[in-house]
Amino acid sequence: MSKQYFGTDGIRGRVGDDLIHPDFCLKLGRSVGRALSVKGRRPLVILGKDTRNSGYMLESALEAGLSSAGADVALLGPIPTPAVAYMTRTMRGDLGIVITASHNPFDDNGLKFFDSQANKLSDAMELSIERQLNTPLPHISASNLGLVFRVDDARGRYIESCKGTVDSRIRLDGLKVVLDCANGAAYDVAPRVYRELDADVIGISVDPDGSNINKNCGSTHPELLREKVLELSADVGIALDGDGDRVIMVDSEGEIVDGDELLYVIALSMSMRNRFCGGVVGTEMSNGGLQRAFEDLGIPFERAKVGDRYVVELLHDKGWVLGGESSGHIVCLDWATTGDGIVSALQVLVAMVSLNRSLSDLKRGMTKLPQEMINVALEDPGGVVNHPSVINAIRDVERKIGGDGRVLVRPSGTEPLLRVMVEGKNSMDVRRYAERIADVALTSVDKGAGTLRSQ
């Protein structure tokens, strides 16, 4: 049975569309409560959100739906996605929900879900919820309503959990850090984490107004961070996304350091401090240079499908703990069950302090292969990827680059985009080949409805 509402990471869309509006969220809340149906007690749902103004509207609808289905609801308020995962596990919740569209523009919103062990929901659970959505839901008496309460110390609990991932003997004093919180969910907790570990923190994009989340800031727009790092002669810059589960960094020379390079630095540091065992999981999008760097270190490397849930699944299958994506989702099962931008950046700072090396120096062991990513905005990217002309264009490029590169064309799981990635030896060839596939994708659409943008 295929899913109608759930994508690769929950449910997401434009506010006011068929899914992201109060009526749907009310029904979704009731469906989630019914799907949990814990015998002998009311199920407990942990509910957080990012800083979008639509979050308050959707929170109220979800809260009402959950309560009307007999589920208790713990409200955390604006807080990072990994904090909701952490609180779901430590509060012994049956389910965690985050109202967020992550790195998307503010007029999008969505919902991410965690099970009782703070892992992404199984396909079976998502299908169970969808079945309830299509089933008439009975009314409930006042005596059977769930209780709703606020958790006032949620941020403090999460801050302590982040700090707990760092050896108490390690201090970050002497490090000047520029921190870009994307005007998102981490605006309050992230500066406090690094300051309480004695780093000198200069915060930017820490003033959310409900509509400025991810706007020309954060991990998807690190240009401002780069300028500030150079202007202030900082040791490092940290850019989180709107819900705090991914991170991109900037070294002291102003070079942007992506998720692949951060994953390499963390693995290198753990290996050099004899704290690493097993291998590392990347994705189909991970740069080929990362795989070669791990081969040089003698560290096994495997690729999962794109999406942090697939990275975590493969980590469990392999019995490994470290994995991530080039976008900045980094997971270490020793620290957390999901991507955590604050904690991942902390591990990079620990590497810098422990090994007494700059981020620029630490990343030198990995040389990225030329890679071009183009996003093609389309109404139906899933249909276009299977168009015969697109398939032929992909095969033609694969023949030209041979065994020296890779081609990956896939629909985004979170936005109406077709992602075209080409990797190879020559940067000019890589760009030309990616543009060729993207152009074919556009012309294959009736009336040519679509746009291109490089990433």
Image (cartoon, grey):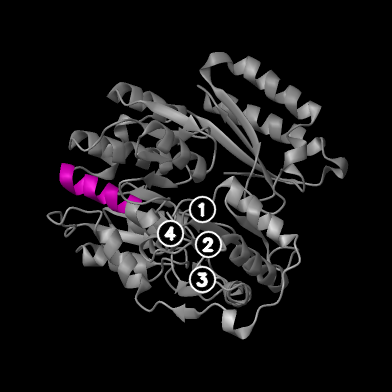
Q: Which residues are magenta?
A: 344-355
Residue at the extreme bottom = 142
In the rendered structure, which amino acid carries the disc numbered 3?
Arg
Asked whether residue 18 is in view, the answer is yes
| Above/below status of 331 relative to 135 | above
Which of the two labelled residues, at mark 2 and mark 4, occupies the earlier sequence position?
4
User: 101 or 360, which lies in front?
Assistant: 101
Q: Secondary structure at mark 3?
A: loop
Give x and y (percent) for residue 270: 24, 38
**Percent x, y of residue 136:** 76, 66
Q: Is residue 350 magenta?
A: yes
Q: Earlier in the sequence, mark 4 or mark 1?
A: 4
Name the residue rendered at 54%, 77% in the picture. Answer: 146
Q: Of helix, strand and loop, which mostly describes the magenta segment? A: helix
Disc 2 marks which residue?
214
Q: Nearer the viewer, residue 398 or 358?
A: 398
Callout 2 touching callout 1 (CB < 8 Å): yes
Mark 1 burial class by Cα count in 10 Å: few <14, some 14-19, many 20+:
many
Of pointers 1 and 3, the one earlier in the residue sequence: 3
Q: Return the x and y of residue 360 as percentages of the image width and height.
A: 29, 41
The residue where tag 3 is placed is 42
Residue 283 horizontal/vertical position (percent) = 49, 35
**In the image, is 150 to the left or to the right of 396?**
left
Look at mark 4 in the image and give the residue it sits on: 85
Are circles 3 and 4 on residues that touch, CB within 8 Å?
Answer: no
